[in-house]
Amino acid sequence: MATPAPKPLTMADVARHAGVSLATVSRVMNGNPSVDPALADRVRAAVASLNYTASPLARSLVSGRTQTVSVVVPDLGNPTFQAILRGLSRAASRSGYHVLVADSAEVVEEEEVLAVASRRRTDGIVLCAPRMPEERLATLLPELAPVVLVNRDPRAGVPVVAADYRSGLTELLEHLAALGHRRILYLAGVPWSASNAHRLEAVEDFRRANPGARVDEVPCGVDFDAGAAVLDDVLASGATAVLAFNDLVAMGLLSALAASGVRVPEDVSVAGFDDIPFAAYTSPPLTTATVPAEELGEKAWLGMSGLIEARDAPESVYLRPRARIRGSTGPAPSAR
Amino acid sequence: MATPAPKPLTMADVARHAGVSLATVSRVMNGNPSVDPALADRVRAAVASLNYTASPLARSLVSGRTQTVSVVVPDLGNPTFQAILRGLSRAASRSGYHVLVADSAEVVEEEEVLAVASRRRTDGIVLCAPRMPEERLATLLPELAPVVLVNRDPRAGVPVVAADYRSGLTELLEHLAALGHRRILYLAGVPWSASNAHRLEAVEDFRRANPGARVDEVPCGVDFDAGAAVLDDVLASGATAVLAFNDLVAMGLLSALAASGVRVPEDVSVAGFDDIPFAAYTSPPLTTATVPAEELGEKAWLGMSGLIEARDAPESVYLRPRARIRGSTGPAPSAR
DNA sequence: CTGTTAGCGCTTTCAG
DNA sequence: CTGAAAGCGCTAACAG
């Protein structure tokens, strides 16, 4: 019963149907006011009766605009990027734009290839590539313009949308200090990522301001497994509180801790970062810093749309995470 | 310092540079063997030295293929759709395809508009529209072909990729029965969704097979809040076990239960559905049924790619969820 | 084997 | 105000 492919209509069909020229149809479809109302109506009628829609492809080819933007993320399985994509996608959609998404599967080389390939089919690209080395990024950028960077260090000419990880971690550190913790462990993420570097700055600030406290760093990954794998280091460190690189790591650690009978927060306090949707539902609920990832996505679209429309200057945006205190952090154990 | 937009090269530039005709460049770029190796090399050299890439837009216009597929989901914030998108995106990427994603924000009308608009820019569409009424879907389908449906009832001519919710729920129900539960509550999701209907069938099967047991249905939503909101109904029902529509609902209920001092599973057992990545990390860990959503995404791509290449017949795929028993379900309380 | 010539479906001068 | 005509950048006959 399947109709044998109702070959899509072209503008010529409409023109014929309405008894006007191609150009007139085009004008009407683009809302060009310089068309006789009577003719315009005839055209609209034809369009309606034929159920015609212009080929986006053809109009893109001539106009040079695709009404689409690319987004490249390292992992669609990461709640933070999911939220960014969601915010971006909904915002872009409101402006009639489409979103082409690419998941680089955490492979940096792939990231570059995808970005370039993806960008060629769209009007601009939002790049989430936290671990791409600065140099590569620098050479890549001209090829990608217009581009908005997410969670990278600021640079001339390219708007950046990022969370201020430094102040977020500072709040968390101070929260821990106020609870009496003097031995703190920071589970570092990807060493060469901007957000890790900023967290490290916060750690430095804190050390300077609290000479009596000690903060150690342990290299760690960025996901569940990484958090679970670092259990022994945590136990051996003698720290009374640990700051995980992100919520995923914290949750991995939390479950490893629970499995080995260590109580949280009685024996050790644990804090995450990002405030992903599930952070409130762990046991105990996770203390963390809220990163409004969805808003980052919206801001990224704002930046992108600014660049595309060449409206305003590409202004960078920094969102400030706030400490979100829940049950996984508590007073430092006195007896030690 | 920004280079003033290095207007992208065209094939004509390459042709000139290599001293050949447009057609020859095109042939070389498309790996057409009927080109003199010497010429071909000259062309390749020109392409390399100019760093030329063909315009995807132009080649799409003429070839009628965009190397892109659309995906429409009701909510990019839902872990199940996230996983589907991830699986699909990675699979498509391996075949050199791009993915255009649209989030309908749970608005059914929007779903149709997005699907149509989105589809026009791609070679096919994967539609996740669980709550779209059958009739609307039926009229929409011809306009969208080729299309792969996710989690919908089978139909002629359109491949469907779905989880077998019925057998999944049956396993869960039997697990509960084996634990001695005789009063069970099912928190129903969207009434007119196929997956809800199938769960209801499982409930029916179970009632027939277990006349001594009682299963009641309570209408409910599909997210955290819906699960939390249904707390009073759960308490009032006198049920010793509740089957949530999905993990999100189960988690919402879990936290509401915890907040009101009801112990899980001692006082009441709770099971979810989907086995989202966080289900293992709730407290207690959530008993659920595993839906391999990422695999659904991969299969969806397989189906899509089959349709596009007109290779194999569009065979539907049904993945079978398995009960994943964790700590949130336990023996029915004896005293009641 | 290679170049010339039509278009793909639409926008946009440029005349009338 | 409207139509004819020239492309956008590329592919695919169709001749040589």
Image: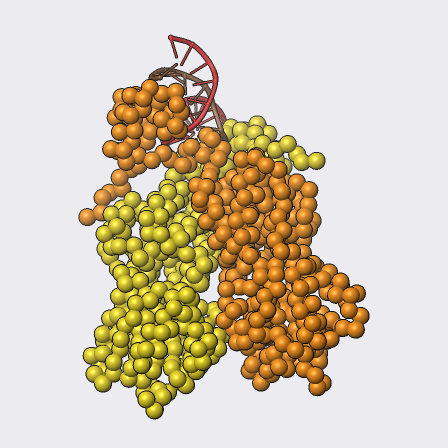
Chain colours: A orange, B yellow, C red, D brown
Asked if one can make out residue A75 in the rendered structure from this viewpoint, the answer is no
Q: Is residue B101 above or below residue B53?
A: below
Q: Nearer the viewer, residue A281 or D1?
A: A281
* Front in this rendered view, residue B220 or A216: B220
Q: Residue at x 54, y 31 (%)?
A: B10
Q: List x then y, in percent, for residue B224.
A: 42, 66
Q: Is residue A281 visible?
A: yes
Q: Residue at x 62, y 48 (%)?
A: A317
- Residue at image x 54%, y 44%? A302
In-image side of A173 versus A278 (left or right)? right
- Name the residue at the bottom extreme: B335
Q: Give the number of callouts.
A: 0
Q: Quadrant of the C terminus of chain B?
A: bottom left
The location of residue A313, given as percent across then percent down, is 62, 37
Q: Is A298 on the left or on the right of B292, as rendered?
A: right
Quarter of the figure that contains the N terminus of chain B: top right
> Position of A140 compared to B315: left or right?
right
Above or below, comparing residue B255 to residue B183 in the picture: above
Instruction: Tell me residue B149's x, y (percent).
Output: 32, 56
The percent coordinates of residue A162 (x first, y second) are 62, 52
Q: Is residue B287 above or below residue A122?
A: below
Identify the residue at image location x=28%, y=84%. B182
